[in-house]
Image (tube, rainbow, N blue to C red):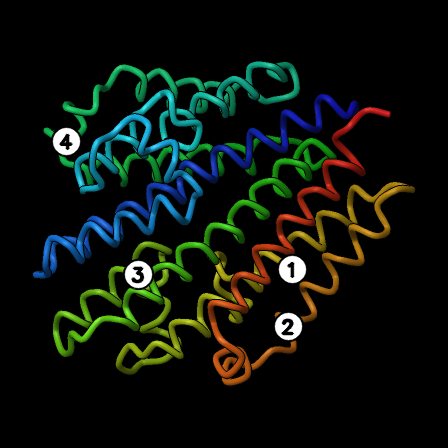
Amino acid sequence: MLSRTADHLYWLARYTERAENLARLLDVSYQMSLVPQSIAAQNENWRAILALNSLESAFAGSYPAVNVDNVLRFMVADATNPSSIYSCLRAARENAHAVRGTLTAEMWESINATWIEVRQQTFEQILARGISEFFDWVKLRSAVTRGVTFGTMLKDDALHFIRLGGLLERGDNTARILDMQYHILRQSDDEGASDFYRWGALLRSLSAFQVYRKVYRDAITPARVAELLILRMDLPRSLHACADGIVRMLQLIANDASAETQRQAGVLHARLHFARIDDVLAGGLHEYLTDFMDRIYELGDGISRDFLIAA
């Protein structure tokens, strides 16, 4: 496969997954903002989203203050923000258009229809219909595109690069969501129903609430939330599941230059496969997640170098 084609497929998947995960992050933050708290604490949580995505300077250049309305507008519909949901869906469509002949008709139609619908909505219209409804729509469109992709694409290198990009982005974003929300929740003094609501919102943001109930059949605790989202191989959005998928995809597309990248992916997978949550928490969850995100970033660099940059 041409490096240029592989690059477009890889980034098509990453941008689609990024839009979905951003919707998940913003949705859980919005749901948590509805819990009684001070305005200062609420705005600090929204500021954390900007910091998580390294967007503080870009935001400050366009908006006078950090608050729920400004951050949502910036992260949802601001075309000047390359990390907004709007920009991610636009980039996904542009990458799909560049390799339209490689995609199935159903896949192209799904991606193109998503872009057409999102560009027809203003932020005011999104708010009027309900911001959570919009986030659900983004997640649904991503799921539709993913289902059409796996259901219609030939199981060749094109599909492998799509899956690789999606898994890399999903692992990185799961770690980011957990890192930010876990820190906020651990700092909270709330107990009882409010605390349960916050942990439940975090699990729901990663489609893991019902799974948690099925696996643990007990009250929601921070350690078990971390274990589920990091180490459980059977949860599709866990870090362990993403790392396992990355290893398998790299094996399928391996070339003469990719041995070191495969080794790095194998090391990351082994650290998750043999880890225990008590050891992870004892060493510091933030440090563990930061190390994971650094390793994902290095894997992305390796993949670009080995497969996506033409010699």
Q: Does 84 sit above or below residue 228?
A: above
Q: Look at the numbered discs 2 and 1 and tell me whether their residues touch, using CB distance below 8 Å.
A: yes
- Element carrying mark 3: helix
Q: Nearer the viewer, residue 252 or 263?
A: 263
- Of badges 1 and 3, nearer the viewer stands 3
- Residue at horizontal 27%, vertical 15%? 120
Residue type of the residue flagged with mark 2: His
* Residue tagged 1: 244
Local SS, label 4: helix
Residue shown at the point (17%, 36%) measured from the top left = 69
Classify mark 1: residues with Cα within 10 Å, few (<14), some (14-19) or many (20+). Answer: some
Q: Earlier in the sequence, mark 2 or mark 1?
A: 1
| N-terminal-most mark, 1 or 4 | 4
What residue did someone put label 2 on? 273
Q: Position of residue 235 (x, y in %)?
A: 48, 63
Query: Marks 2/3: CA distance?
Result: 23 Å
Q: Which residue is mark 4?
A: 127
